[in-house]
Amino acid sequence: MGTIFLLMFGAFMFFLIFMRIKQINQYEKGVRFTRGKFSGIMEPGWMIYFPLFQRVDKVDIRTRAVDVPYQEAITRDNIPVRINAVVYYSVSDVAKAVLEVMNFYDAISQLAQTTMRNSLGDRSLDDLLQNRAKIAEIIKQELDAKTNGWGIDVSALELKDVIIPEELKRTISKEAEAERERRAVIIKAEGDRMAAENLAAAAETLTRTPGALHLRTLQSINDLSSDQSNTTIWMVPIDVLEAVKGFADAVKKNNAK
């Protein structure tokens, strides 16, 4: 009986000394190695392992954000630019993330930098400024394709800032100002053309309708007379005045008889 107790006590002490409990959080997964060989994935919870023979590496499977530092690149039209971005990714296969790449956190950052520089070299400056979201999606797809073998899923990539030389900014500003002036001249000319067409149509309508011009004249006089401060000057030919005077003299002679 004493021997059995001693054996049980020895076994208990053995497990107590050599056994460990590993806690895997809900947002983590564990990669277990037994005698240096991959032996399985540990799910969230308490897991028993033996440190003498086994090792457990915990991997965070939450979405991470990597800030890609400013990268200098030359666009297709030979303009130097500086651009930075942020990459959002998560671990989809923890076994590959641990076994296929030494440090996937640093590898993602380095790969994002080189992929972004290579992609910008094939774009013009106008394309980069106008289609930033489209270019970011293309870079994201290239990065995702390269990291699939690492068990990494790139969910999004956003280009944050595009910095161009100050001299080029002034040139772009002058170009934009000239473009606005060109559009203003075109709009003004279009307005003058439409106004001339409307005036021509109105004149044609007045010509075709008898008495329309007199009505328009009377309407204009009425509009002017609504304000007592306005003074209306009538230009009457001298022949008309002489005719009126002759008519008045004839009326006077007729009355004298």
Image: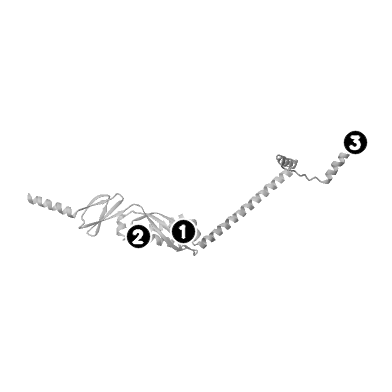
Q: Which amino acid does label 3 sit on?
A: Asn
Mark 2 surroundings: few (<14), some (14-19) or many (≥20) residues within 10 A: few
Residue under circle 3?
254
Q: Which amino acid does label 2 sit on?
A: Asp
As helix, strand or loop, the secondary structure at mark 1 comes to strand
* Residue at the (57%, 57%) spot, across then down: 177
Q: Seen in the image, is 98 located left or right of residue 222?
A: left
In this rendering, the label closer to the viewer, 3 or 2: 3
**Residue 181, image x and y in percent?**
59, 56
Instruction: Report which quarter residue 65 is drawn in.
Output: bottom left
- In the image, taking residue 17 as reference, residue 185 lies left or right, namely right
Vertical position of residue 185 compared to residue 224: above or below:
below
| Residue sitting at the far left | 1
Earlier residue among tags 3 and 1: 1
Give the Cα distance between marks 2 and 1: 23 Å
With 59 as the anchor, is 14 left or right in this view? left
Q: Where is residue 226 in the image (x, y as percent from the top left)?
A: 70, 39
Q: Which sits earlier in the primary sequence, circle 3 or circle 2?
A: 2
Give the mark, 2 or 1, whose residue is nearer the N terminus.
Answer: 2
Q: Name the residue under label 1.
A: 162
The one of 122 and 253 positioned closer to us in this rendering: 253
